[in-house]
Image: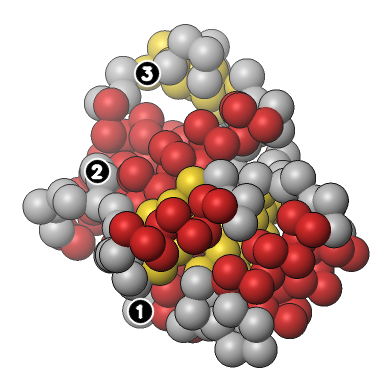
Amino acid sequence: MARILVVEDESGIALGLEDDLRIEGYQVEVAGDGITALRRAREAAFDLIVLDVMLPGKDGFEVCRELRRGGQRTPILMLTAKAQEAEKVLGLELGADDYMTKPFGTRELRARIKALLRRAGGEEPDQPKSYCFGDVEVDFRRGELRRRGEAVDLTPIEFKLLDVFIRARGRVLSRDQLMDAAWGHDTFASARVVDNHIANLRKKIEPDPAQPRYLRNVRGLGYRFDG
């Protein structure tokens, strides 16, 4: 499982990145300033660093420069609110591998991270061939769900939701997180649509959909998968 260091001082953005990347199956650590980021990047082995430019302590350019001078070859994806070409050129000249300007779409960020990991020979998120809970087996290679050995029809969205829940099992996922993961960042889906799909999914995986054992509602927060 690939390890990613997210360096971002804006807590809302940092939390959003952490949640999104964890849902995708990555191990994530967050640093809120350049000094901490530099220390952690030297102490621990990361497969990729997502590095904001505007940071307290040391800015992203300084962090990138010092890591490269010290021989660190970990791929670096730089983030900035500045759109000037000179900023991008400077980051790349200092040794960054890629560059994104805020605001950015989460799907594009995921795609760039995967591309950098492939290029570096790092791991992408682990995806098990199958996963079992209760009398249910999910076959990820075939995109199938079987219950007591019998195939159960799932819609593509239902299968994607179940995949997201299994990756994040034991963690509460908000409806917004589920919409982004299953429908995409620019979706027009609503919270009610999410609830309806989960209700249908419960009918296919729960012993008693009225008393769910696996897809649990966490009041005021979202849903948690306990399978």
Going from N to C along the chain, the mark reached first, 3 or 2, is 3
The CA span between labels 2 and 1 is: 21 Å
Question: Number of marks in the image?
Answer: 3
Left or right, 184 with respect to 110, comes to left
Name the residue: 41% across, 48% down: 109
Residue underneath mark 2: 183
Q: Where residue 6 sits: x, y (%)?
A: 60, 64
Going from N to C along the chain, the mark reached first, 1 or 3, is 3
Q: Give above or below for 40 relative to 192.
A: below
Name the front one of labels 2 and 1.
2
Q: Where residue 90 sits: x, y (%)?
A: 49, 60
Amino acid type of disc 2? Trp
Going from N to C along the chain, the mark reached first, 2 or 1, is 2
Q: Residues within 10 Å of mark 2 (few under 14, many from 20)?
A: some
Residue underneath mark 3: 152
Name the residue: 67% across, 31% down: 120
Q: Residues within 10 Å of mark 3 (few under 14, many from 20)?
A: some
Name the front one of labels 1 and 3.
1
Viewer-nearest residue: 23 or 28 = 28
Residue 23 visible in the shown view = no
Quarter-of-image position of residue 62: bottom right
Q: Residues within 10 Å of mark 1 (few under 14, many from 20)?
A: few
Name the residue: 52% across, 20% down: 140
